[in-house]
Image (cartoon, grey):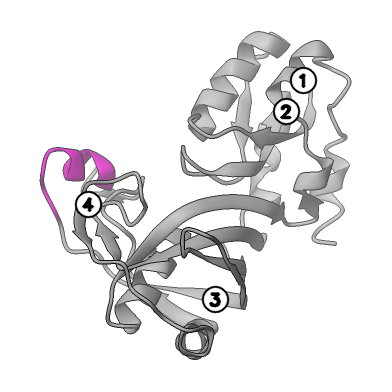
Amino acid sequence: MDGILLVDKPAGWTSMDVCAHLRGVLHERHIGHTGTLDPNATGLLVVLTGKGTKAAKYAENDNKEYAARLRLGMVTDTQDVWGTVLKNEPAQMDRQTVEAALEAFRGPIMQTPPMYSAIKVRGKKLYEIARRGGSVERQARPVTIHRLALTDQDEAGDWGLQIECSKGTYIRTLCADIGAALGCGGCMSALRRVRAGRFTVDQAHTLEQIRSDPEGYILPLELITQGGEG
């Protein structure tokens, strides 16, 4: 069963949880994805099945698009609201001030990967080191923020961000860095992936829908191997 499944990942599932679940649903051993989503994030996860797992290389450099929320004044060890709180002093910032801070993060930037990430250093994943209370030096890496727009502020005071970015960008780190630039600290309070390459979350299906018709939602591999972004 070779093809593409567009999944609207629920919060609380890791990307590999979704793949493991789909192995049982589809009775297919070879299942992978084209880009990890944080466990507490929701939205588009592009899953490849069967021989389709070999097509991941065609999508590895695709741009991604996200809807995120930024909480200013809170700093955590994971750079999101689900980590251990290191500082929580709610910050009152007007829209003009926040808008001005975003300018420095548009275009090519250098970003230091967070300790709570799956990047390996000397054979060990950073999050494994972090969970044991350790920390290692990380090299900043080039990423590109193609679009960064402020959308709204909700009742809790969190700011909405629309972000289109290159492969390897950590939205948690972007939120933390924006907070640091504003002098109050910050972290990510919500994240939803709305696009990956040519695919959008509007095309995705819930796990419940996929369970009801396991083969009915599989798309042809040519959409990745021949289509490119669109």
Q: What stretch is highlighted in magenta?
A: 126-135
Q: Are marks 2 and 1 in contact (CB under 8 Å)?
A: yes
Q: Which of marks 3 and 1 is nearer the N terminus?
A: 3
Q: What residue type is labelled 1?
A: Ile
Q: Mark 1 points at which residue?
A: 210
Q: What residue type is labelled 4?
A: Val
Tell which residue pokes out farthest to the left in this image: 133
**Which of the numbered marks, if any, corresponds to residue 92?**
none
Label 1: which secondary element: helix
Q: Name the residue under label 4.
A: 85
Q: Is residue 142 left or right of residue 5?
A: left
Examine the rendering and report whether any part of residue 29 can be seen.
no
Q: Which numbered disc, 2 or 3, marks the residue closer to the eye?
A: 2
User: What residue lies at 87% left-to-right and 43% top-to-bottom?
Assistant: 222
Q: Which numbered disc, 3 or 4, marks the residue closer to the eye?
A: 4
Residue 67 percent across, percent down from the top left:
62, 59
Q: Which numbered disc, 1 or 4, marks the residue closer to the eye?
A: 4
Dot 4 alpha-carbon crowd within 10 angstroms: few under 14, some 14 to 19, many 20 or more: some
User: What residue lies at 45% left-to-right and 81% top-to-bottom?
Assistant: 109
Depicted 146 relative to depicted 194: above or below: below
Gap in angstroms between the C-alphas marked 2 and 1: 6 Å
Q: In this view, does 151 lie to the left or right of 208?
A: left
Q: Which numbered disc, 2 or 1, marks the residue closer to the eye?
A: 2
Q: Earlier in the sequence, mark 3 or mark 4?
A: 4
Q: Name the residue under label 3.
A: 144
Gap in angstroms between the C-alphas marked 3 and 4: 29 Å
Q: Mark 2 points at which residue?
A: 206
